[in-house]
Each structure stands twice: as C-alpha cells, then as structure tokens.
Amino acid sequence: MTTAFDFTAKAIDGSEVPLERYRGKVMLIVNTASRCSFTPQYEGLEMLHERLSDRGLTILGFPCNQFRAQEPGSEAEIEQFCRLTYDVRFPMFAKIDVNGPNAHPLYVWLKSNAKGILGTEGIKWNFTKFLIDRSGRIFSRYAPTTRPEAIRGEIEELLEAV
C-alpha cells in the first residue's frame, strides 16, 4: 500500500526531501500561489503551524502556477514573498504541477485516493488541502474555499490519535 511517506519532493532550496522525514506526523499538504484571492490563507496555515507543530503537525506548501499563472515567480521569489508577507516557517517546496501529464507523483496519488466534489480527481484551484494521518494515509481533502482554521478540529483529532 502506498502512503505519503513513499514520495520525495524538491524543497524550495532545491534539496531532495523524502516525505519519510515526516513519518509519525500529521501533514496538511497544500498547493499554494502568491497572487491568488486565497493567498491570505498563508496566515491561517502559519497560525496552525505555530500552534500545532509541537504536537506533531507539519504543513507542506507546494507552489503551483497552473491556475491563471498566479505563481509566476522563481523559488527564491516565492520563498521571499512567503517569509516577508506572511512569515511562513512551515516547509515550502519547489514549484510543481498538480494536474496534467507533468503532475508531481505525490499529487497523482493524492488526487486518485481523495476525490474532489462530484468524484472529480483534478485539482480545481490553488489552496486545495489534503490532510494526512500519522500513518501517511489520506484522511480528507478540502476545497480551496475551506479556510485552514476551519479544519483545526479535525487536525487536533488526528494529533490526539496515537
């Protein structure tokens, strides 16, 4: 059985990161963009990171430029924007595709195992969220309109489950 821990992704600094590194953690995986109407969700994501990381939550941000070119910058520009504008301290990764023939394998797995509205697989927009339990299995998928603080209760339930 495949879990989130079976994948590797390139960090925003270019280093390869095996997601095995997060074994035993609850993960919230989010495709992000700097020029989107949902970009202020970085604030809520960082708040969750600040308040729950010591209990085992890890947020993983994956910039994506597939939706109206709302993430056009380089990794360095994205990292600077996130740090200066929202003081993002959770792990950010290199820009990826989440849909189409060049979709990152992690997102191929996420989409095929957690369908969206009406059973669709494709990511519809920036800030689609996937909540992963401590064993690396998908717990739930959330629409871009779902604010990070709205899923705090479910995150805390997973953090308490041992």
Image (cartoon, rainbow, N blue to C red):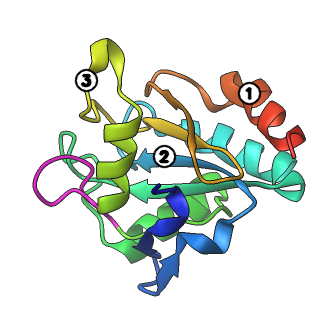
**Region in magenta:** 95-104
Q: 126 above or below 3? A: above
- Determine if the magenta segment contains residue 97: yes
Residue for badge 1: 154
What label sits on residue 30 in the rendered view? 2
What label sits on residue 140 in the rendered view? none
Q: Amino acid at mark 1?
A: Glu
Gap between marks 3 and 2, in whole Å? 18 Å
What label sits on residue 120 in the rendered view? 3
> Please, what secondary structure does the residue beneath circle 1 have?
helix
Characterize the local packing of mark 2: few (<14), some (14-19) or many (20 or more) Cα atoms within 10 angstroms: many
Tell me, yes or no, whether the two marked residues, 3 and 2, touch with CB atoms within 8 Å: no
Tell me, yes or no, whether the two marked residues, 3 and 1, touch with CB atoms within 8 Å: no
| Left or right of residue 157, residue 143 in this image | left
Considering only order in the chain, which callout, 2 or 3, is on the residue closer to the N terminus? 2
Residue at the spot 62% in from the left edge and 52% down from the top edge = 86
Characterize the local packing of mark 1: few (<14), some (14-19) or many (20 or more) Cα atoms within 10 angstroms: few
Q: Quadrant of residue 75?
A: bottom left
Considering only order in the chain, which callout, 1 or 2, is on the residue closer to the N terminus? 2
Q: Main secondary structure of the magenta part?
A: loop
| Rendering coords of residue 55 (x, y %) | 89, 52
> Please, what secondary structure does the residue beneath circle 2 have?
strand
> Please, what secondary structure does the residue beneath circle 3 have?
loop
Gap between marks 2 and 1, in whole Å? 16 Å
The residue furthest left is 101
Characterize the local packing of mark 3: few (<14), some (14-19) or many (20 or more) Cα atoms within 10 angstroms: few
Q: Nearer the viewer, mark 3 or mark 2?
A: 3
